[in-house]
Structures are given as C-alpha cells and as structure tokens.
Image (tube, grey):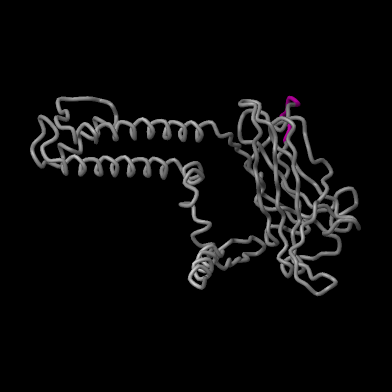
Amino acid sequence: MKLRLKKILKKQKSQIIPRVHIKNNNGKFEVMGMGAWHSYWRDPYHLLLTIPWSGFLALTFIFYIAINMLFALAYLLGGDCIANARPGSFPDAFFFSVQTLASIGGTMYTQTTYGHIVVTIEAIIGLMGLAVMTGLAFARFSRPTVRVIFSNVAVITPCEGLPTLMFRTANQRRNMILEAKIRVYFMRDEITAEGEFTRRIYDLPLVRHQTPNFSLSWSLMHTIDTSSPLHGMTPDSLFQTHSSLIISLSGIDETVAQVVHARHNYTAKDIIWNSKFVDIIHQTPDGHRYIDYEYFHDVLPLSMSEKEQ
C-alpha cells in the first residue's frame, strides 16, 4: 500500500505545473519560465505551423537527413544486403535509402530477406512522411493572413469638446476586409475593496467600431467621458497601474473569403497626451483625394488654443 502511494505521489509531482514568472515591461506582460509543459516540442504540429518558413525548411531537411542515416545504418547491420553497393559503404547505403524513401529507384536493390523487410518498413514510413509534409505545407500556405498596420502610438486629443483617445490602422493590401470590426480592451492593475490585487480588463466603446469595407486608413476614437475607465487618469497614473490597450481586429478577407485577425498592443509609454495625428488625407488641384502614408505614425503637439477647447 505504501509503495503504491509513493508511486501515485511521484506521478502527481511530475505533473505539477512549474512556477510561472510574469515579466512586466511597461504594461506588456511576458510569460517567463513556463517549463517543459509549455514547450513547443510538446506540440510539434503547432510548432511546424507557426515557425518561420526558414525554420520549417531547416527542420524538414534535418529530419530527412536523419531518417536516411538511420536506415543506412539499418542496411549496414544486415551485411551485404544491397546489390551493386560497396560492402560496408555508408554513402552507398545512405543514397540507397534516399532512393527508397522517395521511390526513385536505381541500380541498387536489396538481395536478402533482411533487406526486403527494411525496405518495406522504409517505404511505409516514406509514404506516411510524404502525406504529413504535404499536409503541413498546405496548412501553412492556406492559413489566412492579414497585412494590417497600426500607428506606433495612440494620442489623447480633444474631439467635439471632449478628450478622446485616438489611434489609426491601415490595410496594406490592395483588397478589402469586409465587415471589419475592432474591439479595444483597457487593462490596468487595481486593488479591490477587499484589498486584493487584480488585473482588470475594461471594454472601451468606440465612436465607430465596425466598417462595411476596410481598404485604406481607419481612425478609431474612444470618448473619455465620465463613464470611461480612462476618465481622471493621467500619464503618471497610467504608468503606476501598468495600463495597456489591447486592440483586436477581425474581418473577412474578400480575396480568400476567410476570417482574418490582427492584434496590437499599446503600453502607457505609447499613449501621447495633448497631441494629434498628422493629417494624411490630401487633395489634388483637380479635386481628387489621396492618402500619404509617409506620415502615418507622425503626431504633432497641440497648440494652446487647441488645449483650451
């Protein structure tokens, strides 16, 4: 009974999630020390879908070389089982494995029962590997992506006589994102009435949170009235409470007819007070309008008269 209890406790101990450290970088939180349970290697499918193409191709190459080396050693263990190959030659066994795995064929072939068995196993693995790699490559190519940029900073500027939080976004592709919607979440540290620490999330209502088609530039505004969680806050209080804004955009890409997502984060240092964005919409002499993205991220300080509004 005691031995069984020790085994159960040992198993439970191995399943305990290690301590998680959260690093706060001006409102941006990074999870540190997650341990093996959060490792990408515990979820290889997700790893192969999310790593850059260079990493995907590198892992594919390493795996391909490793599997052929493994079967080359297996052929060498069978003695002289490959016809037209030099006895004990690792390069010949390796290239025979390459030909077998890819179903290429050549002048070399197995001539013993042992060799036939190894070839059969390798042929099955080759078929399965080809199907898996084809599926992964298709999944990576077919995954919908979006090319949306957000202004580097958000500003707090008067609008209609009230202080207004404003930022802007733009679609970098020459197509439309249909039924685009944006949600803004405001996060800050708070102490509850019971004296407990909490990281509270607020939904910030926007003057306009959706558009039927998002093709060029879009300015988003949140009015800071008495009902806003930003009401009464200052630059110092934003820093002290580690405040941040989470922007979430979603819509339907008209090219692939699939839902796409984009996300951005603004910390307290990214929110500039008493400033306004440089106007990027201009008019030509013949009456046409155009957008100059060169000044997309630029802001200007408010004049004294504008501050008094």
The image quadrant where one finds the C terminus is: bottom right
- Identity of the residue furthest to the front in this view: 1
Q: Left or right: where does residue 241 sit relative to residue 41?
A: right
Queried whether the magenta region covers residue 99, the answer comes back as no
Residue at point 76%, 56% (across, down): 186
Residue sitting farthest toward the left? 87
Q: Position of residue 136 (x, y in %)?
A: 46, 35
Q: Is residue 241 left or right of residue 226?
A: left
The residue at the point 8 percent across, 36 percent down is: 86
Q: Residue 72 at what x, y percent from top left?
A: 21, 41
Which is nearer the eye, 283 or 271?
271
Q: In this picture, which residue range is highlighted in magenta?
A: 282-287
Query: Quadrant location of residue 242?
Result: bottom right
- Which percent across, then down, holds residue 112? 15, 32
* Magenta stretch encompasses residue 285: yes
Relative height, residue 83 to residue 200 (above, below): above
In front here: 59 or 154?
59
Number of labelled discs?
0
Q: Residue at x 64, y 60 (%)?
A: 28
Q: Position of residue 9 (x, y in %)?
A: 53, 69
Q: Main secondary structure of the magenta part?
A: loop
Position of residue 153 in the picture relative to residue 162 (left or right): left
> Foreground: 136 or 289?
136
* Residue found at the far bottom of this picture: 195
**In the rendered image, is residue 295 in sight?**
no
Does residue 293 appear in this view? yes
| As drawn, 290 above or below 67 | above
